Image: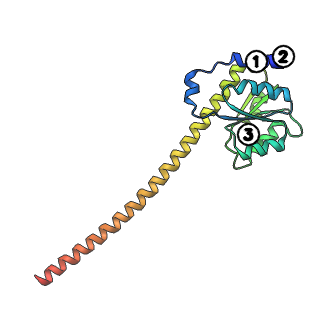
Amino acid sequence: MSSLGTSVSAARESVSVPDATRASMASRARVLIIDDQPMARAWARGILETEFECRETGSVQEFFELALSEPPDVILADLEMVPLNGLQLCRLTKAKPALAAVPFLLLTAHESVTDKLSSLADGADDHLAKSITPRELVGRVRATVKLRRALLRAADLEALVEQRTSELRALSERLRSEMKRSEHLESELRLAQKLTG
């Protein structure tokens, strides 16, 4: 087995996924990995596929084809790629309405606080050092997925509340109209009774 294969196997073994976490995720979250280095993609995929459905590419064109055909739950990108670096790719990704809300995580050798703040200011949702442990990488992606799913549920609930509110307003208007009509009919009935009685 190659040293990469050994490294990926060791990384997988060091990532334990609690049964409760596996059971709570009705469907496996999708992670799209983009890195121009095949070994780096294999390392990330080997770690993350223990818990997530992973797709990977080294091509910007293929990245957008994959992302737009089936938007991922999380994007993991290397910062130092060519022809576009990770921040440029992040900006292009966030500019696409179908992908704007997908969390974008940058994986980089740059670990200074300034680098992290710069990445976050430029639109990345997280800045992960390449020295990250396999367990931490899975944990950070898992936390990002949970947050994304909670935000999607909140948006769905908000839309449902707006729909129900609109339906209640329409019902209220119909009831007011019916009440006015009923009051008008009662008034006409009383008037008719006075005239005939």
The secondary structure type at the circle numbered 3 is loop
**Amino acid type of disc 2?**
Met
Give the foreground label among 2 and 3: 2
Question: Disc count in the image?
Answer: 3
**Amino acid type of disc 3?**
Gly
Q: Quadrant of residue 127?
A: top right
Mark 1 touches mark 2? (CB < 8 Å): yes
- In the image as oriented, which residue stretches furthest toward the left? 197
What residue sits 51% from the left and 45% below the top? 157
Instruction: Work out how far the residue at label 1 is from the one at label 3, CA to CA, in angstroms.
Output: 33 Å
Mark 2: give few (<14), some (14-19) or many (20+) Cα within 10 Å.
few
**Amino acid type of disc 1?**
Ser
Q: In the figure, 133 relative to 85: above or below? A: above
Location of mark 2 (residue): 1
Q: In the figure, 95 relative to 73: above or below? A: below
Q: Earlier in the sequence, mark 1 or mark 2?
A: 2
Q: Quadrant of residue 142?
A: top right
Location of mark 3 (residue): 123
What residue sits 14% from the left and 80% below the top? 194
Left or right of residue 52, residue 178 in this image: left
Left or right of residue 189, residue 98 in this image: right
Location of mark 1 (residue): 9
